[in-house]
Amino acid sequence: MSARNTSLELLTCPEMARADALTIAAGTPGARLMENAGAAVAAEAAHLVPRKSRIVVLCGPGNNGGDGFVAARLLAARGYGVSLALLGAREALRGDAAGAAAAFAGPAVPLGQADIEDADLVVDALLGAGLARDLDGLARETVTRLNDWSRRTGRPVLAVDVASGVDGSSGQIRGVAVKASRTITFFRRKPGHLLLPGRLACGETIVADIGIGEEVLDEIAPKAFANGPALWGARIPFPTVAGHKYSRGHALALSGGLAHTGAARLAARGALRAGAGLVTVATPREALAVHAAALTAVMTQVCDGPDELAEILADARKNAVVAGPGLGLGAPTRALVLAALAASGEKRALVLDADALSSFSGEAQALAGAIRASGAPVALTPHEGEYARLFERAGETRGRGRWLEAGVAPQALDAALEGLRGGKLARARAAAALTGALVVLKGPDTVVAAPDGRAAIDEIGPPWLATAGSGDVLAGMIAGLLAAAMPLFEAAAAAVWMHGAAARQFGPGLISEDLPEALPAVLRALAASFAPHV
């Protein structure tokens, strides 16, 4: 049975191997799992092309190839014209893959002799998700030829588990990868099915039930999830009949100078729409008139520098701060961020975005030390450029000592620094582990990563979110949910998902000002599921 991605959990390649092993240890033979996987591949292939079509199955030397042998046998039995090509020698196959090959009565030509030109469908069962090195030699040549064929003919490629060449745990491309029309995977998706560029190589990914029980998840305890309402919907702080605006929290958005006021207003509007009961823009005196003329439901308060910010934050009712959008680069912004952290604790949350991050370029240790000293729940929301600037020189010899001074545990430091050089999920987790903050690493596959290793990967953000100011709105939305007392990880994941859903709700032509106005429709739909009596 196949499904269109209804499960939250994402399993890395080692975790998926563990799921297989636990199932086999509980009494289900590996050969049965392979038979079920191959049957799912055959069923999906039959959906893609009509009976009597010619199907070429490309098999590798491992269990992925074993799935391909099973699919080839079942498709031939259904009346399809099946040709099978194998990377390596048939007699070299081992274990369940050897058994699957023995059950296939047809020939297995060498991979280099695969005749795909007049195929109606090619099944890519070459290499599995746990690929450890870049493709080379005949495998690389075959992938290149297959992609050229698919591009020229427009005929489909069905990948087994992942598109060959995609690292299932990271989504990275190992030199070159098959560009599949569709991918069928088993039990649960992997991070590489959602992360770019792997997501693009895999095409639409569907999940097949092959007999692995849900109970294995208790043993594996995965920490990566597909971002969606099932992950956080029950924690959304919808208003209650007995509530009032003060019980929904008060968010503070810090503004830059006269020429850079729009970004703070976008953040403030996002915070108000997302759920904060009150929102104030803390503005330099020179920009007060501009904000006062442009704002209605959002209040203003004068703030010229860290001392005045500390006075404002002496009011504990202001329980969430968003700093960075349009704030300006350099020492004044660093001072404001440090003042906000120093004036906060576990009951005030901070969202640091844009200029608040870039003002600490190459000084991530200093920011991390201030975050850890504050004890506050903090979210950092960089895009890739801001991330690179913040963590440049982070792994230098001098930098290691400064991380220890910032409070990073020695036993965790090496792994975190190594993670900074990995794929997007690894980099987001590494940044969270190093800074002690939740990290929202933005993009079309935004990753939300907590210091405890939990991560949510987004897959719904449409391309028209790539417009000036959309990140400012997102930062404000996170702050608004935090002001309303939603937990940090859930607030960030929810804001990312709602941000994308609002953009989809509006559609092409979106500009950042449209995002807060599209949120009510998104919230209404969520309330119908998670707060039906509101």
Image (tube, grey):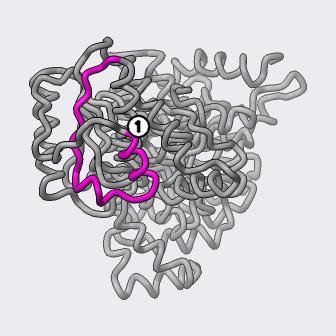
Tell me: 230 left or right of 420: right
Query: Residue at 33% of width from left, 25% of height from top?
Result: 76
Query: Mark 1 is on which residue type?
Result: Val
Quarter of image, res 356: bottom left
- Which quarter of the image is occupied by the N terminus? top right
Residue 413, percent from left and from top: 50, 79
Foreground of the two, 477 or 339:
477
Highlighted magenta segment, given as a residue range: 79-103
Quarter of image, res 498: top right
Query: Residue at 29% of width from left, 38% of height from top?
Result: 124
Residue 353, percent from left and from top: 46, 50
Query: Residue at 29% of width from left, 50% of height from top?
Result: 60
Foreground of the two, 341 or 83:
83
- Which quarter of the image is occupied by the C terminus? top right
Query: Residue at 47% of width from left, 31% of height from top?
Result: 39
- Position above or below: 80 against 453: above
Quarter of image, res 491: top right
| Residue of label 1 | 70
